Image: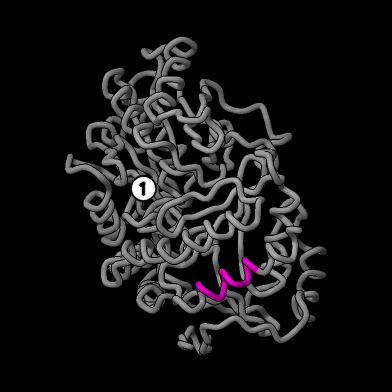
Amino acid sequence: MTDLLTGSHTVAQERRLVTELPGPRSRELAARRAAAVTSAVGSVLPVYVERAAGGVVVDVDGNSFIDLGSGIAVTNVGHAAPEVVAAVQAQVAAFTHTCFMVGPYEGYVAVAEELDRLTPGDHEKRTALFNSGAEAVENAVKVARVATGRSAVVVFDHAYHGRTNLTMALTAKNMPYKHGFGPFAGEVYRVPMSYPYRDEPGMTGEQAAARALDLIETQVGAANVAAVLIEPIQGEGGFVVPAPGFLPALTDWCRRSGAVFIADEVQTGFCRTGSWFASEHEGVVPDLITTAKGIAGGMPLAGLTGRAELMDAVHTGGLGGTYGGNPVSCAAALASIRTMRELDLDAAARAIEATMLPRLRALQERSGVVGDVRGRGAMLAVELVKPGTTEPDAALTNAISKACHAEGVITLTAGTHSNVLRFLPPLVIGQDLLTEGLDVLDAAFDAHVR
């Protein structure tokens, strides 16, 4: 096993349970939390984290977990990636904040330059930086509306775009994201997603696009559409990968109709799907692209990058925010991007897929409860259904995920019906850890599927 240094601690890259879960220190912290933190904020794990490195998370009682979640696709370069840690430490020692809108600094400009280079398309681009994916998405809608002079925004079934008022309107799932929080922003229109497992058998991507576009044209009107906003692979919606041809058909329609095509790559970006961005798998070039999560190795940062004429259509001062493009986060982002290049992490994601997909498909064959296996790179999922049906089985999904947690493997759930197990391992995870995590998953299925 490899040992990694994080701060003054050495973190062995191994799964190791030394107490019951949660252990005594975690239980103490849970009691303090109950008295201090609102119950409206939930947590997946019952334990409290003390340190993490690479592909392992260690709790306050010394239990070590294999991480197949990456803090929801954030620690693509691994926990406490050495180059990121060094960059953050150096920047903190220099200065922590000036507000780019008051006293600008090179780090912000350098991150914008990287995003302009890395994102799909060789056209001239501009970038603005924010704090979160929801903020980036909200600002993308602002840009599209100003640039087009239109107001309607088209989104898709099963979409997730954030928790602010506008992005809740853009998000499809009610509980827990929207319930009781309305009224929501207007001029948002939802159309069907290409969902190969649940669409009519044989429906192509082009046919699914025609279905959606017909609704847009008849119920919204092409001349009213400011933007079509989509995740190239849906995240919280269940890692839904649209059928080939769906995304290109949408982009073609946007070009013809004068609408802005926005790719929400908050979860799919930065090597996660085996390419730098998921749009690249079908050669799709978005007009605007939103990024966050994996961009900065765990530090809060988000980006909005797009065609120069669109981004520059907004009046000076129209985009920004006090903390947007924080200098420490920018330093972390530049180090993360260097690490992705140096370690060839898009190839690492493809290698993770090569290990995981056969195991997940074998699980599908023998379990009788896995309706679909899907995803790309290190963004993979299984959709659980009741035997012999396509009826979602959220209870089984939750039980298997909790069984993995109890054995020291971090897994996450997703899906409109909460019946999807999603896997987002750090792209630097060791092969032995990944294999062991899959062994635990197999055992959890064996224990819960009769």
State the residue position of label 1. 278
Q: Nearer the viewer, residue 289 or 381?
A: 381
Q: Residues within 10 Å of mark 1 (few under 14, many from 20)?
A: many
- Whether residue 109 sits left or right of residue 393 in the image: it is left
Can residue 208 be seen? yes
Q: Residue at x 62, y 50 (%)?
A: 370
Of residues 132 and 158, the one nearer the viewer is 158
Q: Is residue 39 left or right of residue 221?
A: right
Q: Amino acid at mark 1?
A: Ala
Q: Is residue 108 above or below residue 314?
A: below
Give residue 86's position: percent from left, percent from top: 37, 78
- Displayed quadrant of residue 125: top left
Q: Is residue 416 above or below residue 131?
A: above
Q: Nearer the viewer, residue 149 or 78?
A: 78
Q: In the rendered image, which quarter contains the C terminus?
A: bottom right
Q: How is the image coloured?
A: one colour
- Residue at 61% across / 76% down in the picture? 65
Quarter assignment of residue 113: bottom left
Looking at the image, can residue 97 be seen?
no
**What is the span of residues highlighted in magenta in the rendered image?**
434-442
Q: Is residue 374 magenta?
A: no
The answer to whether residue 143 is above or below residue 108 is above
Please report the residue visible at 39 percent of the width from the left and 18 percent of the height from the top: 150
Residue 277 image position (x, y, % from top left): 34, 50
Q: Main secondary structure of the magenta part?
A: helix
Residue 348 location (% of width, % of height)? 35, 67
